[in-house]
Image (cartoon, rainbow, N blue to C red):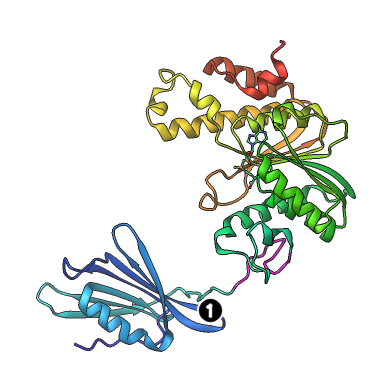
Amino acid sequence: MEIIIPDRIIKGTLSVKKNKENKYQKCTIKLIKLKNEEFYQISLFTDKQVFHENIKYSEIKEYLNNIYSNNFMNMELFTNDKIFSYRITSKGKLLTNSKKNNSLIEIENHNKKKNYLLPEGIFIPPLVDLGVLTKEGKIIQSSYDKYKQINRFIEIIDDSIKNETKLKIIDFGCGKSYLTFILFFYLTEIKKIECEIIGLDLKEEVIDFCNDLVRKYNYSGIRFLKGDIASFDTDSNIDMIITLHACDTATDYALYHAIRMKCKYIFSVPCCQHEINQQLKTDKLHSNTKFGILKERFSAILTDSIRANILQYYGYKTQVMEFVDFENSPKNLLIRAEYIQSKNSNALVEVKELINSFEIRHTLYELLFSEE
Ligand SMILES: C[S@@+](CC[C@H](N)C(=O)[O-])C[C@H]1O[C@@H](n2cnc3c(N)ncnc32)[C@H](O)[C@@H]1O
């Protein structure tokens, strides 16, 4: 049977499988704009996966006729004026219905460039060597999440350093140093800030690789050092420390140095907070700790709460914020702190209460207060 499909559908859903052989549970369609041309984005849902395809605007009526009559019992289609419902009864009769659509549906524009501080197209040469950009300056698909994280990280730094003209920065646990290179580029080339950055990491091969890039591109303001954050020392005055996903207690050592050196700015995204998870007494909080994932999340939150309070105690104005969506990275909390020399004594009282009541050791606390 030929089904009459309305013109200019904006979105729709097909549901209720017609027969067991149909592996799709559901199908959705939506009108999208791609390179100034309109397409329909089709999403086909199985039990476990979703498959996407785009079809031409002119092909939608034939596509819906086929897929609906072969695979589904129900279909709902939206135009900007009306909502059309189709239902095939158990006796195989098609029932149709329409009602007024009171809400305007926007067509998704898939061309929209993300409003990044460093939008796609800005060419940062070492990122080609690091496999983030193509030679033409396009972001490589698999690096989008990292690029977004770094953009947000730099946006947050940018928001704090409005009046700075000169900065000395350490990137603790710099790894492949995407953040280090992008931040250096942003500060020196775009903000025109005089800037020195040290990247520190345990891994010799990444440090050698990054130093080769420094030489290749003549970035005299960046140095990479191989070493353990725990034993790091410098005579220089450091203005800012950054950490992006420095594992477990590496973040504590980084914060410890920042406090010890009275660094003005701290931007730290912790990761893999195992220390407390391994110590948490399971009888104390059994309703939580009997679920592994809740114990892990709770331990991570406890770890970062203690860190943030210790920073407040030492005179840092401290915030803990989600810097990217959870889908972008589940390790999405950023501790942002600025040294304003306003000590919060009560924060330490609260830290001690947490440490005593959970009977835990916490590296940052021990580094600073073990003599007490
Ligand atoms: C998950 S990676 C993140 C790398 C980089 N910041 C990024 O976001 O792409 C963590 C890095 O921290 C480094 N790291 C962990 N513990 C360290 C320590 N105690 N001292 C120096 N580097 C450390 C690791 O070698 C690794 O390269």
Neighbour tally class for label 1: few under 14, some 14-19, many 20 plus, Cα within 10 Å: some
The image quadrant where one finds ligand 1 is: top right
Snapshot quadrant of residue 348? top right
Q: Quadrant of the N terminus?
A: bottom left
Q: Measured from the top left, where is residue 367 in percent x and y?
A: 70, 20
Query: Which residue reaches farthest top?
Result: 372
Q: Measured from the top left, where is residue 363 in percent x and y?
A: 64, 23
Name the side, left or right, on which 24 lies relative to 334. Answer: left
Disc 1 target residue: 34
Q: Measured from the top left, where is residue 150 in percent x and y?
A: 66, 53
- Mark 1: amino acid: Leu
Q: Nearer the viewer, residue 306 or 90?
A: 306
Vertical relation: 47 (above or below) 350: below
Snapshot quadrant of residue 259? top right
Give the structural element (helix, strand or loop) at label 1: strand
Residue at 71%, 36% in the rendered image:
318
Residue at 69%, 26% in the rendered image:
310
Name the side, left or right, on which 164 lies relative to 47. Answer: right
Residue at 31%, 74% in the rendered image:
76
Q: Quadrant of the C terminus?
A: top right
Q: Nearer the viewer, residue 315 or 200?
A: 200
* Residue stretch rendered in magenta on the structure: 112-123
Q: Is residue 195 magenta?
A: no
Vertical relation: 1 (above or below) 224: below
Q: Measured from the top left, where is residue 121 in percent x and y?
A: 70, 69
Snapshot quadrant of residue 57? bottom left
Q: Give the prevailing secondary structure in the magenta stretch.
A: loop
